[in-house]
Amino acid sequence: MELTIDRDRCVGAGMCALTAPGVFDQDPDDGRVLLLDAEPQPGQVAAAHEAAGLCPAGAITVIGDPPGPRP
Amino acid sequence: MHHEPQATSSETAARETAPPTEPVTLPTTRPTGCPFDPPAELAQLRERQPLSRMTYPDGHIGWLATGHSVVRAVLADPRFSSRQELMHHPLADIGELPPATVGDMTGIDAPEHTRYRRLLMGKFTVRRMRELTERVEQITAEHLDAMERQGGPVDLVEAYAQPIPALMICELLGVPYADREIFQRHTTTLLTQSTDQEAQYAALTALQEYLHALVLAKRAEPTDDLLGDLTTSDLTDEELTGIGGLLLAAGLDTTANMLAHGTFALLSNPDQLAALRSDPDLADQAVEELMRYLTVADPAVRSALEDIELDGRLIKAGETVTLSMQAANRDPQKFPDPDTLDLRRKATGHLGFGHGIHQCLGQQLARVEMRVALPALLTRFPTLRLAVPAEEVPLRTGMNIYGVHRLPVTWDKE
């Protein structure tokens, strides 16, 4: 799994930092998304997927690895 | 990234062959004796077609969205505008709506909205709001102490649900809490759907005058709070006054209603109440589920800027779409057994805070307030119960934010 973010779209709602705190954070000054880990460990993949789906502004894109249980 | 279940082919076929239905009006009457449930017609509409034609009180024929997937799609789509002057009001014929007042970022689109949102969003981050947990705990404990001293029955709205978020938003913005009666009164007038235009205008003017004076004072002598910080930005006095009014109104009325109505819902579902009381780890999930189940801020409205095809229907440029978040949050395709309050379910993905670029700016503050204040109340008063029959609790029917006007509660003295 690989993640990309679009900080121009971010509206600072915080859903990513709330849902996958090991993968995303918010810039303390402007509140916008910070990507802590562009290639999350297996244990974080489900949360990262969920965070991407919950982002109200569509600012997070997942490349590869469909959500769901992995083999 | 969308995870919504798609309509099955048989359902799509059924929808296509169903006879065309006349435009509906927005259902607003909740079933008698079910203070937590949306109007039953919303579920019927959602089953028939998640996007229905709707007649607006001014005669406009627009749309009503009731399915989770459709409501979410509209909220996320910038081709649907939030500009107030493009809207047809879903509940009343009040003529052409004026543009949003200066600083009201809920009624504008990007890029004007972006400028305001960016100035504010760093002040409502998950981390910043969690840092307020201790302060919320302190305020909560003080109000529980006061309730305990007074003894039951007390009105939970006045004694607990209103003052906790009010104190928090006042401290955050830098509004003297002693002045709260002034703006609480005006805010209530503004948020009552039945209030006549003249009274609304008077309340708005009074609130703006109060905040304008406050902004001028902070410009002269900057204070260490949100409004004080913003005086160093490029915002005009008028913009700062408008933003202050919006944040104050949003902070006062929303969480307050969630706390009171949430308590009412828990008291009406003893098994869920017991679950939360016995398992403090359930608090985060409980907050999300109560947001889903109660959806006190509803509906949202958008207008199409161009012709848009959605769910097999063509929404024409200029048509208004009313988005029923309460119907969406009870959509069985998204939430199985949606009419059951189940604190153990995974309720994330609910639209209680909205979706899209206007999603609630203060949602992380609201989460902290709820996750502290609800369990603390239940822990302090193990025998908490309604002091009147449930059907006598006055409901906020016809208010922008739903909930209860009063919640008389009592408990056994130790």
Image: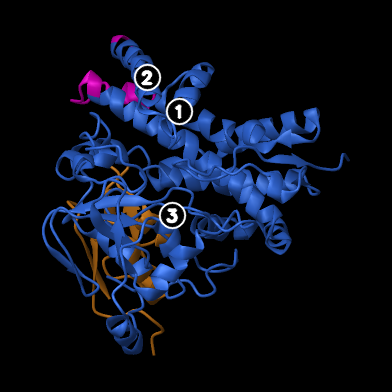
Q: Separation of disc 3 and disc 2 at Cα?
A: 30 Å
Task: Give the label on residue B49, or none.
Answer: none
The answer, for residue B130, to whether it is visible in the render is no
Q: Position of residue B369 (x, y in %)?
A: 54, 42
Colour theme: by chain
Mark 3: which secondary structure? loop
Task: Give the label on residue B189, or none.
Answer: 1
Q: Could you tell me which chain the residue with mark 2 belongs to?
A: B
Task: Give the label on residue B352, or none.
Answer: 3
Q: Which residue is more in the foreground, B39 or B257?
A: B39
The 10 Å Cα crowd at callout 2, few under 14, some 14 to 19, many 20 or more, is some
Q: Which residue is more in the foreground, A52 or B362?
A: B362
Q: Which residues are magenta?
A: B220-238
Q: Could you tell me which chain the residue with mark 1 belongs to?
A: B
The part of the image, by quadrant, that contains residue B309 is: bottom left
What amino acid is found at the position of numbered circle 2 in the picture? Ala
Q: Separation of disc 3 and disc 1 at Cα?
A: 23 Å
In the rendered picture, chain B carries what hue?
A: blue
The answer, for residue A4, to whether it is visible in the render is yes
